[in-house]
Image (cartoon, rainbow, N blue to C red):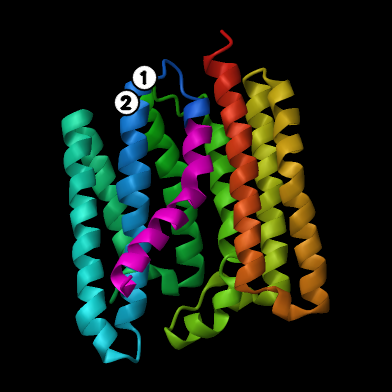
Amino acid sequence: MDKHNHLIQTSFLLSFIYLPLFLIAISQTHDLNWLHTGLFFIILQVLMHPSNQLQIANANMELSDNKIDITQQAKKLNTTSISMNSLAVVLSILVFSLQFGVGILGYLLLSKLHNNNPIRLRKYAIISLLLTMTMQGVLLFALTQYATGKLMLITNVFAIQACAFFVGFVYPLTQMYTHTEDLKRGNHTISIRLGLKGTFALSLVMFLLAISFMGLHFYNTKHVFHFYLFLFFLSPVAAYFFWWRKNTRLQPLVANYRFTRLFVIITTICMSLFSLVLIYLNHFTK
């Protein structure tokens, strides 16, 4: 398998990091249209998120010292990413509406500004963090609700903020093992700015804010039991986070790809299971 095909397959796997955010949004959507939900799932998970991962891989190749990679691989990745983005926009217009297609296009353009050279907003620590929280937490929630059912931003204002802060919890932690590579590429990430200890401190604050806003959401919607479910499913994530934080203080090398991947897997599984339970309670028991 050549590097191009390998990166495409990897991009599909990485796209499932965002699956819990999609599931949470549809769990809180009223008048859910299951056909539209399935179609938007394909647009989001098969086209949009994988193409974003390819953009990141492409930008990293362009900054590589290996000029062969730039001429042979980066161009192929760029073509594949543009094709997937174009198909996502066209399908969004055909399946949903012109306005929704414009929204998807805006999301993709923001992603391109964030990931691609020469602008590459991901190299600016605070801007990158805030933009990622806005895109994956706020904008994705709104687009999902618009596509799959009834858009209710006021009712879900606390849930949207919880999703944004949850992204803020995960995002800095995934940057810890790439400090050396990011510095070489000029990416002054929030994790580099804060160091390992500061990264865990920031993520802990984001984590507590996400929990608080989710609690406010369920209290506001009179589903307090759902908040207890949230805490139950989130407990393995919290346990792993504090274990990882403690061991990283003792041995900084623990902040590596292996433990980051395990953190992402645990978080994705726990949040997805919680969201699926909410979908069942909200859409199949009434």
Q: Amino acid at mark 1?
A: Asn
Residue drawn at the location 79% of the way across and 59% of the way down:
242
The local crowd at label 2, few if under 14, some if 14 to 19, many if 20 or more residues have their Cα within 10 Å, is some
Q: Looking at the image, is 172 positioned above or below residue 268?
A: below
Residue drawn at the location 48% of the way across and 80% of the way down:
182
State yes or no: discs 2 and 1 in contact (Cβ < 8 Å).
yes
User: Which percent across, then down, holds residue 271?
Assistant: 61, 41
Left/right of residue 33 with respect to residue 238 in the rendered view: left
**Gap in angstroms between the C-alphas marked 2 and 1:** 5 Å
Residue drawn at the location 33% of the way across and 79% of the way down:
61
Q: Quadrant of the C terminus?
A: top right
Residue 58 falls in image quadrant = bottom left
**Residue 120 visible at all:** no
Q: Residue furthest top?
A: 286
State the residue in front, 130 or 73.
Answer: 73
> Label 1's element?
loop
Residue drawn at the location 25% of the way across and 60% of the way down:
81
Residue at mark 2: 36
State the residue in front, 285 or 31.
Answer: 285
Residue at mark 1: 33
The magenta-colored residue range is: 1-25
